[in-house]
Image: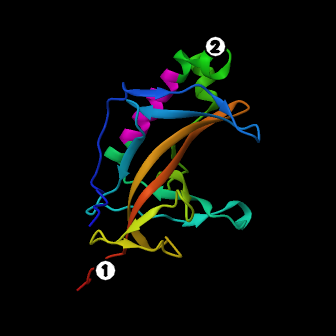
């Protein structure tokens, strides 16, 4: 039986991360791959004891028919948000130091901060969320698991489920003066929300 290995991952040393040279695809979009000592940079979000939820489920822009959709995970405040805030701080410093190589011109740290889109979204009093892109079919489709670590089909609806996610930081996207990260869940442990008797 394949283990989903969905235990919490804690990493605060970003010294092995490297952003590759920019590449431009056939549609003119520019991106830079991120590696962690030559491998993918993968983190586990949530745990069996502190699972995630998603407020909106998997959605596409204007509800277009596509198998690649956006999904936002609510993050528990604390260690999880601290990690991604630390990653964002590392990214801003790295992008500033390597701005001539990555953007074609030197930028100040203030200019990088102006264009950088953080991984964590914060909106008013709502819980912070981490925005990802999830593939629901094809060769890179997300693998879904039951709490018993058995493969299951991807749910039709992710809202209302408790989730643990294994996420890769795929690449940095660059569009005009804006840039940020594409995060993609590779594995999701999905379970119904546990019910506790109130009496």
Query: What segment is highlighted magenta in the picture?
Result: 82-94
Tell me the residue at 37%/46% (across/down): 43
* Residue where numbered disc 2 is placed: 106
Placement of 163 over or under 11, stated as above or below: below
In the rendered image, residue 146, in percent from the top left (x then y), is placed at 34, 72
Residue at x 37%, y 26% (from the top left corner): 16
Judge whether residue 145 is colored magenta.
no
Q: Nearer the viewer, residue 160 or 105?
A: 105
Q: Which label sits in the foreground, 1 or 2?
A: 2
From this viewpoint, is residue 118 visible? Answer: no
Give x and y (percent) for residue 189.
36, 65
In which image quadrant can residue 13 be found?
Answer: top left
Q: Earlier in the sequence, mark 1 or mark 2?
A: 2
Instruction: Based on the picture, tell me whether residue 89 belongs to the magenta stretch.
Output: yes
Locate residue 180 relative to residue 62 in the image: left or right.
left
Q: Residue at x 70, y 60 (%)?
A: 61
Q: Which residue is mark 1?
A: 195
Compared to residue 103, the image places residue 81 above or below, namely: below
**Would residue 28 be found to the left or right of residue 73 on screen?**
right
**Label 2 secondary element:** loop
The residue shown at (71%, 67%) is 63
| Vertical order, 114 against 97 (above or below) | below
On-image quarter of the C terminus: bottom left
Quarter of the figure with residue 147 = bottom left
- Depth check, front residue: 98 or 161: 98
Residue 51 percent coordinates (x, y) = 34, 62
Q: In the structure shown, which secondary structural element does the residue marked by tag 1 occupy?
A: loop
**Display coloring:** rainbow
Task: Give the Cα distance between marks 1 and 2.
Answer: 54 Å
The secondary structure that most of the magenta stretch takes on is: helix
- Say if residue 63 shows up in the picture: yes
């Amino acid at each position: 039986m394949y283990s989903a290995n969905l235990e919490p991952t804690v990493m605060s040393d970003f010294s092995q991360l490297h952003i590759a040279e920019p590449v431009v695809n056939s549609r003119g979009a520019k991106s830079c791959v991120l590696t962690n000592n030559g491998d993918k940079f993968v983190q586990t979000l949530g745990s069996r004891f502190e699972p995630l939820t998603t407020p909106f489920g998997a959605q596409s822009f204007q509800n277009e028919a596509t198998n690649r959709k956006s999904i936002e995970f609510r993050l528990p405040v604390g260690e999880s948000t601290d990690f991604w805030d630390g990653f964002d701080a590392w990214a801003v410093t790295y992008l500033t130091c390597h701005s001539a190589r990555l953007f074609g011109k030197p930028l100040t740290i203030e200019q990088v901060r102006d264009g950088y889109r953080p991984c964590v979204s914060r909106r008013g009093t709502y819980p912070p969320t981490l925005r990802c892109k999830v593939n629901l079919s094809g060769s890179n489709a997300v693998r879904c698991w039951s709490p018993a670590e058995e493969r299951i089909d991807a749910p039709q609806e992710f809202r209302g489920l408790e989730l643990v996610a294994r996420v890769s930081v795929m690449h940095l996207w660059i569009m005009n003066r804006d840039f940020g990260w594409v995060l993609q869940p590779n594995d999701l442990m999905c379970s119904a929300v546990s019910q506790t008797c109130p009496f």
